[in-house]
Image: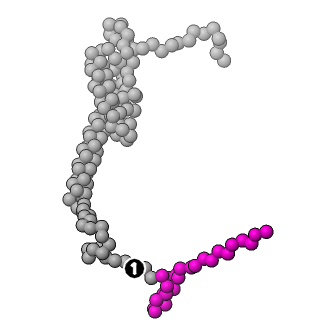
Amino acid sequence: MTELNQPVSVPQPPATSGGALVKPHRGVVVLVLGILGIVVCFICGIFAWVMGKNDLREMDAGIMDPAGRGITKAGKICGMIGTILGCLWFFFMLISLALSLLVFATRHERVEVHSLDPSSADIPQMSVPMSPSSDDRSDVLEPIELQVEPEPEQ
């Protein structure tokens, strides 16, 4: 069992050879943004690419903890892949939209109405039979005449 009066050790940020403190690395953040850039949205990949580039530059200068160099490089590479795939997808969508509009514009038939007169020869006349014809079709019904009798007054 531990005693309550024992000193607690708090982890200190790593120091450089000169004894100055350095910033902690953001490798996990860069990696998560890079993976999200591939899977979800390429804008996250742009952030991972830029953050990874800046963090690696700070690690080389000794300002940031170099322990996260591998994770930061992996995140930067994932961000680059996500950004490139997103740009390819965007250009593919633009090209497919342009091609579909081009096909629609060339194959669209225009309907022109010459005359609204029903006796015109261009417009076929339609007639709907209202009573069964001689071939006795069962799908054609006769019109029904309704007779309404007035209510008797009281």
The main secondary structure of the magenta stretch is loop
Depth check: 109 or 45 in front?
109
Vertical relation: 16 (above or below) 34: above
Measuring from the top left, give residue 103's x and y in whole percent.
Answer: 23, 57
Identity of the residue drawn at 67% across and 75% down? 149
Q: Does residue 148 appear to the left or right of 98 in the view shown?
A: right
* Front in this rendered view, residue 131 or 60: 131
Label 1's element? loop
Toward the bottom, the furthest residue is 134
105 displayed left or right of 131: left
Give the quadrant of the N terminus.
top right
Q: Give the left or right position of residue 14, taking residue 115 as reference.
A: right
Residue at (42, 14) in percent of width and height: 13
Position in image of residue 78 (x %, y %): 32, 36
Image spot of residue 40 (x, y percent)? 38, 40
Q: Which residue is mark 1?
A: 127
Assess whether residue 141 is covered by the magenta stretch. Answer: yes
Q: Residue furthest right?
A: 154
Question: Would residue 81 be seen by someone viewing this image from the given angle?
Answer: no
Task: Please name the amino acid that badge 1 sits on.
Answer: Ser
Would you identify the image quadrant in which residue 121 lies? bottom left
Mark 1, residues whose alpha carbon is within 10 Å: few (<14), some, or many (≥20)?
A: few
In magenta, the rendered stretch is 130-154
Most distant residue in the front direction:
153
User: Residue at the location (37% across, 41% down)?
Assistant: 39
Residue 131 position, x and y percent, is 49, 85
Relative to 132, say whether 45 is above or below.
above
Q: Is residue 78 above or below residue 144?
A: above
- The residue at 34%/17% (across/down) is 64
Q: Is residue 137 magenta?
A: yes
* Residue 8 vertical placement versus 26 (above, below): above
Which of 10 and 37 lies nearest the eye of the viewer?
37
